[in-house]
Image (tube, rainbow, N blue to C red):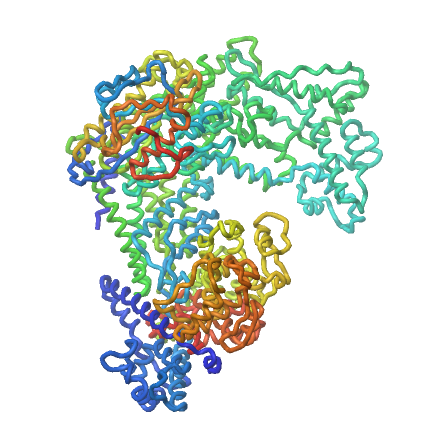
Amino acid sequence: MRNRTKSSAEGVTRRTVLRGAGVTMALPWLGSLSAFAESAAPVLPKRFAVLFMGNGVNEDHWGSGGSGAEMKLSKTLEPLEPIKHKINVIHGLFQKRATGHGIHPAQTGCLLSGSEIQRGAIIHAGVTVDQMIANRIGQDSPQSSIVLACEQPMTGFHETNYSMAYSSHISWQTPDSPVPNEVYPSLAWDNLFENRGSLRNMSILDRVIDDANALTRRISSEDKIKLDEYLASVREVEKRIDPNRKSKEAAADLAKQRNRPVFSMDRPANGLPEDLREHARLMCDIIAIAFQTDKTRVASLLLARDLSAMYYPFLEVREGHHAASHNNLSDGYERISRFHLSQLAYLATKLDSMPEGNGTVLDNCCLMWLSNMWIGRKHDNTRLPLVLAGGLGGALETGRTLDYVNAGDDNRKLCSLFLSIMDRMDVKLDRFGDADSRLARM
Amino acid sequence: MHRADRSLTLGAPIGLSRYRQQAAFVILWVHAFERAMRGTGIAIVCLMVLISTTARRATPAQFPDADLERTFTQTVRPFVTTYCAGCHGGTAPAAQFDLKAYSSLSAVVRDYPRWNLVLEKLTAGQMPPKGMKQPPAEAKQAVMDWVQAVRTNEAHKNAGDPGPVLARRLSNAEYDYTIRDLTGVDLHPAREFPVDPANTAGFDNSGESLAMTPALLKKYLQAARDVADHMVLTADGFDFARYPMLVETDREKFAIQRIVGFYEHQPADFADYFQAAWRFKYREALGEPAATLASAAAEAKVSPKYLPLVWQLIEEPPEAAQREVGPIAKLQAMWRALPPPPADSAALHDQCAAMRDFVVRIRKDTGMQYSAPIVAGLPAGSQPLLNWKLRQFAAHRRESDPKALRNDTDPPLVTPPIPKYPGLHREAAYRWAALIDKSRAEDPDLVVPHAERDRYQASFARFASVFPDAFYIKERGRYFPDDSEDKGRLLSAGYHNTMGYFRDDTPLMELILDEKGCDELNRLWQEFDYEADYTARTWVQYFFNQSGEVRGKGAESGSPRPVDREITDNSVIMEMRDLYLAKAAADPNNDPVAPEAIRDHFQRVNDTIGAVERLRREAEPHHLDALCRFAARAWRRPLTPPEHDDLLAFYRSLREKGGLSHEDAMRDSLVRVLMSPKFSYRVDLVEAADAAQPTLRRVAAVAAPVTGVPLTSYALASRLSYFLWSSMPDDELSSLASSGDLQKPEVLVAQARRMLKDDRARALAVEFGGNWLDFRRFEEINTVDRERFPAFTNELREAMFEEPVRFLLDVMRSDRSVLDLLYGNYTFVNPVLARYYGMPVPSGPADRWVRVDDAGQYGRGGLLPMAVFLTENAPGLRTSPVKRGYWVVKRVLGEAIPPPPPTVPELPADEAKMDLPLRQLLEKHRSNQVCASCHARFDSFGLAFEGYGPVGERRTQDLAGHPVETEAVFPSGAQGNGFAGVKAYIREHRQADFLDNLSRKLLAYSLERSLLLSDDPLVERMDRLLAANGNRFSMLVETIVSSPQFRNKRSPAAPEPSPVLRGDRKGGG
């Protein structure tokens, strides 16, 4: 039996710490908890993450040429220079169903699903690629996916009469309902390591065992046999959850040894991290730890939504994100684009510093960074900026520029890329969205 | 034995299957025993008692044990030694069946199912086999009588034994139905669960078969989470929605749909009022002289509050009417022109519609017009300004715009050019005003005599006070009130990008809704804000995305992230207000109403956010009360005080120690309630007695009657509701359980009658009928080749499934003779099935089902020729007389047939490729004696159905073009042709089999266990009462629910069980 009082005492401590700790933030690095650092197993899990920024990039500064050591990266892509041998810059892909229905929400609502979306009061889109992967491989990890955002959703209507929900959510688990975005790093952390998910189930199951035990005293012996079956099942499920609790406890211990709180940020509703730089970095850290410790294998991070209202005083841009995108050839907007791309670089570098098997965690990942537009001032999404990082355990060759700009519409489908990625994650589908063929030259 | 004669004609070996089933049962118990070994010692002891069948009590019986024991020693053993033990004895007994091993009566009783086999073999003359020494007839008869006597003795000795009804989890179907009734939403959380196994009686609702595994438990957890995700907190409790309630848009959708649904259900069509007024006016001519306006309103389903107002306006004394001018005079003229009774109803309807159209036109053209106040530097779409406009519209819907009228002396109006839609953030009211001006200019009814302008104006005003220009606004685009674009934003305020809603329904409240309706609508709006928190969220979105407008940064700019403060705080809101007020004061040309509009807006935002926050705090205790009520319903009995405290303690620990929000803690508490075995298991607690009957348990313990001790009232309520509804008890049943009245047999029977009429009784048709007749999973079948049978669509498959459900439900609800199932010359069809059957097609959608009488002319009627059974018992590209016949004999008539031996010749898969008709191929098969012994018992039933093809379609040729023959020789030697022949044969020879089988199946289903020998007397009673009461279905249900088996459970000092019978009919039957 586990000692319930112990864990609750800990909870009190944590809350106390959290209340007192102010705004300094610290995430424990869980080297000792890495799920596969020492693994000799030949098959390591493959992970997928998507990072999204709305409203396109500065097209003058977006480009790459050549492959391998010769690969040249343009200004916006510069942050990726140190790990360019582990990325693929893909030019010219597009999402056909995101074109021709007006600007903004319709350009985002089907970006990752390739489905038709519905105008008006009833929201209807499609299951997105990250959630499709989560549905197929998610049961192998405590959380099937994590869906994070640095910006709160909007839920009104755009002038095109599409709901702003399409602009605010990139991950859809069912056609009727997006996955709730987690915007608070602290709650995202809790999700993975503390109260949510499996551990919340644990406290429920504890009580269920109490119920069953209480009941057993009041029933006949033959009924008891049936109930024992139930109890045994509950205990079995608890046993499978238990390692999560242990890793949480270990994380807390580790932090204590270093004389640092586990995670010292106020929980909502006290607001988001004041500084977007810190916010984005924390979200990337959480994804990195989640991947490293195999808490989940699928993540999505909305850095700035479509029609974003983010401000970037630290980049010396006076306008908000969306307004700035209407002048996307400006230096300011280039800095905004580069800032968001640097999050990919940060996450990839972080994952690349985590040994796993014979390589690093990044080697077993596919991180996809993309936007819903190419040129913000024209709302042009006839091609999209897109970068992949990570090699999916050798299944995906990296260090390349892949150009499909002139490949013809049928051969430059975003959904074809999704099929290709899913193939390499052992999620084999005949078709996805509007595609039934894989992307050539992948 | 009143059925012994039948057993002679029908007798056949059924022993093999029984043997296997018995073995399976023993294995189950061995598993249980092993589990018990790992558990407590007490369990082992009790189990030993349970397994033991040593007779412990001397009960008066027709055949005292001593007599039977004597006969066994003197007659049966010598018979066995002489005629049987040669093979069935020694070291390697034939069929592993050692008859010499039975040394006493008790040994025989313990293994009775195998002795039933002995009886069957002797009856059928199959043992001793030909060529062996044959016993004299009297000796054989004596042994047969003895075996029967043992059964009768056992049956009566333990008659009424409630039997071992094990604790069991809800079946998948029950789980789904229970969640539906618990939450009010049909979520089907069990759709991901693996299929439940059936028990030996063929039902998936018994503890014998329903097991739990860790994998299933995980699915339970997922299902419980799924259900909890649909929970939405309301001001006074919680509710469940059809969608998960996790994302903001889901909550909005839920609340909006409730409000819009409410609006759309209100009687707001003027034409209906005119028609109701007409009925009232002519009440005497229409034969309703006592009618009042209230009764007329009730009959027409219009508002009794509004009808008198309309009546007063249109029906005035002649002298008053003569003085009317303008729209009232015109409407009254139309009113007077309505034809008196007997009026052609279509004409009346049209004229009332014309009156309505007149009212609507006048009101549209005279509606008050508003635009947002102009403030230099602010867009017209600015929320404080736009809301002012919306508020003006909402406040003046019962007024007539004086500017709409023209004097007859005025020159004709020049209609203005209509401007284009303005850009974003700009006021569109000017375009709308131009459209309205145009419409007014073209409306002759707005021209009034110059001299009488005031009189006319008064008429327009009174007209408008009765007829609002709208009762409510349910959608707004961004150009409101010009809604020609951007439809479909329900309740929206029409803001750009940010969310926002606006309520405009005062005329509905003032004119149509009664007090209760007003309260309900107010509550829905309050809950909308409570659930979706829309005022606060609109504020937040506006703050971050549009408040930049006041700082001159443009309408699509907001504020950066605030630091260290809540933006819904009063100070932030008022600070923003002051910025707007400063803007309004900055330019003398600004609309003077702007400051008021601004103050009003921010004050409302501030007050509403505060009120919702307050409501939220106040609601938490209500939520916890609701949680406890929910748990009591989920657990199907009141919570004990410790359970109550424990549940609240769990919630508190989630909040305080787990750091969860209120809502998350509520959701987890729901999951905890649903994961408890108190929800997912049906357990009859050992406390036998209700509080009302405190002495029962002691009495029971002393007497330990074979009929057990009464179930608690709550357990009885559950047993009844899971029998008839496959779901939890409803409020009525629970309150009868609470008062203890349910224990009264007459109350129990009355409840059963009530429940059979309820919609939920469909579960009995689907779950009992579907498992009994084996069509429960028909909708999953995919054996039909859709290219060869293109008519077989999903819709047809659905309709085929539905036909027996409708039929059974009709027999149950209308309490018809259960023989209708066999002989009823009617069935039920929807348009899809009617077309398929070649019957007249009812008009309407696919869910319109009608009864078809005289179905025989289409080759249908009753269960037997339903396409669902004919299709399911055909392997795809041909028919299968074997499977169809087997289905009739086994499922309908209840005859047990052993499974075929492993080596049977395959029939060709495709009828179209057969050289010989199937009939002749089967004849060849039957020429083999081994095959014939079984096939003779059922092939004929299937052959008679050869007039129906592989998907149940009528036919005269098989797929290879051979003409089909439907002649059959039934087991008794009787001849018959086709479906009619089957019916005639059953009526003459097998009807009692059918009835007995139905009784047994229904009893096994209701008791949630396999039948025991000791259930025989109850089955006989069911058969008897059925026959005496016109075979009405209710007799079966009433006899069951009145029986001790149903109402009691075994006493804790349990009697030994009598041998299990698995619902088989009696020896040789």
In this rendered view, identify the residue nearer to me: A290 or B721: A290
Which of the pair B230/B1064 is nearer the observer? Answer: B1064
Position of residue B509 in the picture relative to residue B52 (left or right)? right
Q: Position of residue B166 (x, y in %)?
A: 35, 64
Query: In the visual, does A125 lie left or right of B372?
Result: left
Residue A365 lies, in percent from the top left, at: 26, 32
Classify B636 as above or below A97: below
State which quarter of the image contains the C terminus of chain B: bottom left
Q: With B210 as the anchor, is B257 left or right in this view?
A: right
Whether residue B744 is visible here, answered yes or no, is no
Query: What residue appears at the point 33 percent right and 33 percent down from the top-left corner?
Result: A420
| In front of the other: A116 or B230 | A116
Residue B514 visible in the shown view: yes
Number of numbered callouts drawn: 0
Query: Can you say whether A75 is above or below B278 in the image?
Result: above
The quarter holding residue A337 reads top left
Q: Quadrant of residue A354?
A: top left
Residue A110: give x, y in percent of width and height. 42, 30
Above or below for B526 versus B845: above
Q: From this viewpoint, which residue is outermost toward the front? A: B915
Q: Nearer the viewer, residue A168 or A112?
A: A112
Give the x, y percent position of residue A222: 31, 65
- In the rendered image, the vertical position of residue B346 relative to residue A26, given as above or below: below
Residue displayed at 36% across by 62% down = B207
